[in-house]
Image (tube, grey):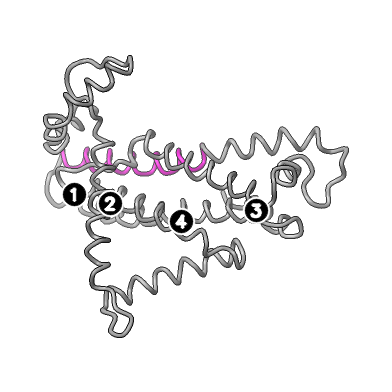
Amino acid sequence: MEKLEHELWIVQAVNAALGPLVARLLHALGRPVPPGDVIPNYLVMAGLIVIAWTILSLTVRRSLSVDNPGRLQILLEDAIRGVQGMLRDYVGEKGPRYLPIVATMFVFILTGNLMGLFPGLMAPTSSINVTLGCALTVWVYYHLQGFKEQGPVAYLKHFATPPGAPVWIAPIMLPIELISHMSRLMSLSLRLFGNIFGEELVILILFSLVPFLVPLPMMFLGLVTATLQAFIFVLLTTIYLGGAVATEHEQHEHGQMAAGEL
């Protein structure tokens, strides 16, 4: 599987152009690499997503209009309103301020999931490195927002004594809460990785056996799975954000949401 992934023409092209430079930089940092593909395939695919969406965003921005919006602008505005509504439902009135992180995660993960359905490409989200990176980004971000909104003391306090709980229960609740928050990294990363990797593997096996019509139903299922997994990821991100930035009287409600998230 690894060998097949590195035979992607675009990965070979990027390594031919940038591989020697990256190898020299890594060697200068004390991390010599063996000859061959220095830049892994998932980084190439992730870079393509960033470049493609940057170009698309700059192109669309030129056509935005307040007086005469086009169909694409109307569609984008409706999508943004939908995400803002979800953020208000789970986070509260301050939810829309977290639109950039939530929307960016959805666009990146959805695009990454769908790339595996195109010949000559692979889904970067089929690599645990990418999904763990996304999970770590969300995990660090919502903790930082919790510190910012509640203050360090109040935010750390809710790990040991949730709203309504007596102080003496703190030694029991603290390790439970810490384990719960650490398990969110596994929940976010492994769920996405497992679904996309398994989907790509099945499509690859079917295509190697019967290369024409048989893989099509699985590819259609992959389209549904790609969208669903991206939505689940950002939904959990929104729930975690809501629990982190909620005030004391709101935390009980967010705790009930998080308890039923799986």
Residue beneath disc 1:
118
Q: Quadrant of the N terminus?
A: top left
Give the CA separation, mark 2 to mark 3: 36 Å
Residue beneath disc 2:
114
Q: Are marks 1 and 2 in contact (CB under 8 Å)?
A: yes
Residue 59: % across, % down: 22, 64
Q: Amino acid at mark 1?
A: Phe
Q: Which label lies toward us, 4 or 2?
A: 4
Query: Which label number is shown at residue 149?
Result: 3
Residue 219: % across, % down: 25, 52
Q: Nearer the viewer, residue 243 or 68?
A: 68
Q: Which label lies toward us, 1 or 4?
A: 4
Residue beneath disc 4:
102
Give the CA separation, mark 3 to mark 1: 43 Å
Q: Which residues are magenta?
A: 186-208
Left or right of residue 213: residue 29: right
Q: Quadrant of residue 17?
A: top left
| Residue shown at the point (25%, 61%) measured from the top left | 58
Q: Are marks 2 and 3 in contact (CB under 8 Å)?
A: no
Q: Nearer the viewer, residue 48 or 6?
A: 48
Give the CA separation, mark 3 to mark 4: 18 Å
